[in-house]
Amino acid sequence: MDQRVVVTGGSGKLGRAVVAHLVESGWDVVNVDRAPSPDPVAPYLQVDLTDYGQTVSALTAVDDRYSRVDAVVHLAAIPAPGLRPNPVTYANNVTASYNVFAAARQAGIRNVVWASSETVLGLPFDEAPPYLPVDEEYPARPNSSYSLGKHVDEQVAAQFCRWDPRLKMIGLRFSNVMEPADYAAFPGFDADPALRMWNLWGYIDARDGAQAVRKALEYDGVGAEVFIIANADTVMATTSSADLAARVHPDVPVRRELGRFETLLCIDKARRLLGYEPEHSWRDQV
């Protein structure tokens, strides 16, 4: 029997890549969103995730569409700070995440993957990080209502897993999501490295983000885990990662020798536990 996964926010930039990749990988996918995808490859269900009743229904049964759900990928959210007033962003995102997590628990779904964010690492890095490359080991440093909401999601997931030791909940701290069409702008970043200092020159190709989601779904484990998901390189064409670190954060310890364009958003944990390995680079597209 095919495994059915509900992907919330499957009509968004990352969501479309995730839905397509999971369909190609043999999952039975349902896209749950407020609006349909402009490029649909899976059945669509319109749901307002801030309504708990609608969320429970979407994760249990919908008439003749389906009668069970095996896993949830929760991507739906106001996707960045500054798009809506702060209270709206926080209330929408935290409520939707709580509803998805609680509805999954009520439905007996024990495989939950959701989009956390690189922002919990301390973006923008006006305050220097404790060390470079940054990783999942230091406490969250939310600097916006959006980021605060993502931090709350991580805490809620940890408590849900404490309540139910059989539950697996994986939060993926995605970097700035990019598609191939976005890469034409990348060579210009070298003219002013400060333009991308806010997230340590990181990015995630949507296709590699989708790979990370699949590997998180397939991960054989229980409990709450968070992973930084970024590409293996920076957005910079000629300036090395070591030079960037020395120029912008000269007093921050660099914990290892850096490859020339190695990401400063450490993906070692995702590589080690999930088997994640980025397959796409903007350098192959430009």
Image (cartoon, grey):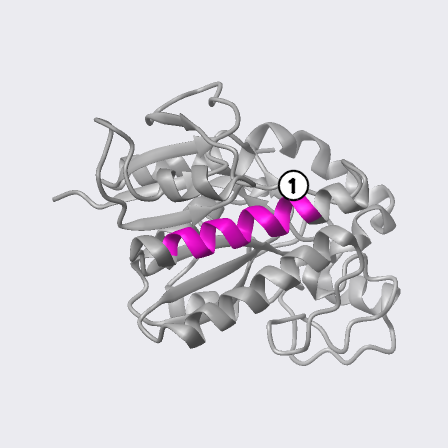
Which residue is at the front of the view, 164 or 227?
164
Residue 79 lies, with reference to residue 262, above or below; the image says above
Q: Residue at x 87, y 78 (%)?
A: 251
Examine the residues drawn in magenta and state their main secondary structure: helix
Q: Position of residue 133 (x, y in %)?
A: 67, 70
Left/right placement of residue 129 relative to residue 212 reads: right
Would you place residue 90 above or below residue 183 in this image? Answer: below
Amino acid type for the residue under numbered disc 1 = Pro
Left or right position of 155 against 41: right
Image-quadrant location for residue 26: top left
> x and y percent of residue 6 in the render?
36, 41
Which segment is the magenta one? 91-104
In-image side of 211 versus 130 (left or right): left
**Quarter of the image where one finds residue 224:** bottom left
Residue furthest to the left in view is 1
Residue 125 in which image quadrant: bottom right
The image shows residue 163 at horizontal and vertical percentages of 41, 74
